[in-house]
Each structure stands twice: as structure tokens, then as C-alpha cells.
Image (cartoon, helix red, strand yellow):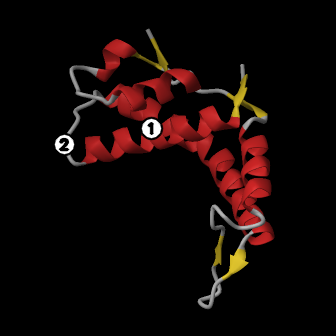
Amino acid sequence: MATKIKLKSVISGYNALQELIAADKTNKFIFASATRIKFAGNVRRARPLYEDYLNVRNVLIEKFGTKQPNGSFMILPTSEGAASFSKEDKDALEVAVDIKFHPVKTSDLGENQISIDTLEALLEAGLVTE
């Protein structure tokens, strides 16, 4: 059954999972195969929402930003559109979305030295249970 959570929790959870997967690939962290499989499945579930958010964010950057000589857009903190961009971006992140994650237990994380920020992101997204 899908759970409604804020998009910002999905995004931060997705980024945290990507960080753990990268650390596992370089042997900085060691996870059991079952934990790796859950991580991969959760990344697959979150990726479409993550990519949709990036597309929305890029549209907002083009809408409120200034076109640079190289064709990219930039929003300076002091620019006219900065406040509007920030508000619309924040509103997009506050949207509740349906997603079904398969959480891992904290014990499945092993003795790895995972940062507090990463653990908080995982907990907030419902990717880890105690």
C-alpha cells in the first residue's frame, strides 16, 4: 500500500540512498545483499518522482532566471525572480505524493558509520524502521 509523504522527503531519501549505494560500491560501507536489493528497489520507485521534480525545478529556473551567455539560466539571490522561484520551488516540495517504499531495519545498516543527516533523510522518507 502506498503512503503519502511530502515530495521533499522522497527527494532527500532518494539522495541518501544514492549516497549509501555509492559508498557500498566503493566498499566504504558494506551491506548485505538483501539490503542492497531493497535500496535498489526503493531508488527505482523514487526515481520518477525525483526526475519529475528536477523537470519542474528547471522550468522554474527558466521562468525566474536570467539567461546567461552560454544559454543556461541562473537565479542570483538578489535578482527579481529569486523570491518567487524560492516560493514556487518550496511549494513543489511540499506536495504530498504516493509512494510505496520497502524499508530496511536499522540493524540492516550494520556497523557502518552513516552520517546523522543521511539517517534522518532515510527515517523521514520511511526508508528505515527501528
Residue at the spot 78% in from the left edge and 36% down from the top edge: 95
User: Circle 1: is it few (<14), some (14-19), or many (20+) Cα within 10 Å?
Assistant: many
Image-based side of 55 in relation to 20, left or right = right
- Return the disc, 2 or 1, that comes first in the chain's sequence: 1
Q: Is residue 63 left or right of residue 123?
A: right
Which amino acid, by three-letter code, is at mark 2? Asn
Q: Which residue corresponds to mark 2? A: 27
Say what secondary structure mark 2 lies in: loop
Question: Quarter of the image containing the C terminus?
Answer: top left
Please indicate, yes or no, whether residue 33 appears anywhere in the rendered image.
Answer: yes
Q: Secondary structure at mark 1?
A: helix
Q: Which residue is mark 1?
A: 16
- Report the residue at 60% width, 47% height from top: 47
Tell me the kind of residue under disc 1.
Ala
* Residue found at x 64% / y 37%: 8
Residue farthest along the bottom direction in this orientation: 69
- The quarter of the rendered structure image containing the N terminus is top right
Residue 113 in the image: state x and y as whole percent.
23, 27
As drawn, 112 above or below 51:
above
Q: Residue furthest front?
A: 78
Is residue 102 visible in the rendered image? The answer is: no
- Vertical position of residue 94 compared to residue 26: above or below: above
Q: Which one is nearer the viewer's eye here, 59 or 110?
A: 59
Looking at the picture, how far across and down is residue 26, in whole percent?
A: 22, 48
Label 2 and label 1: CA atoms lie apart by: 16 Å
When asked about the image quadrant of residue 33, the answer is top left
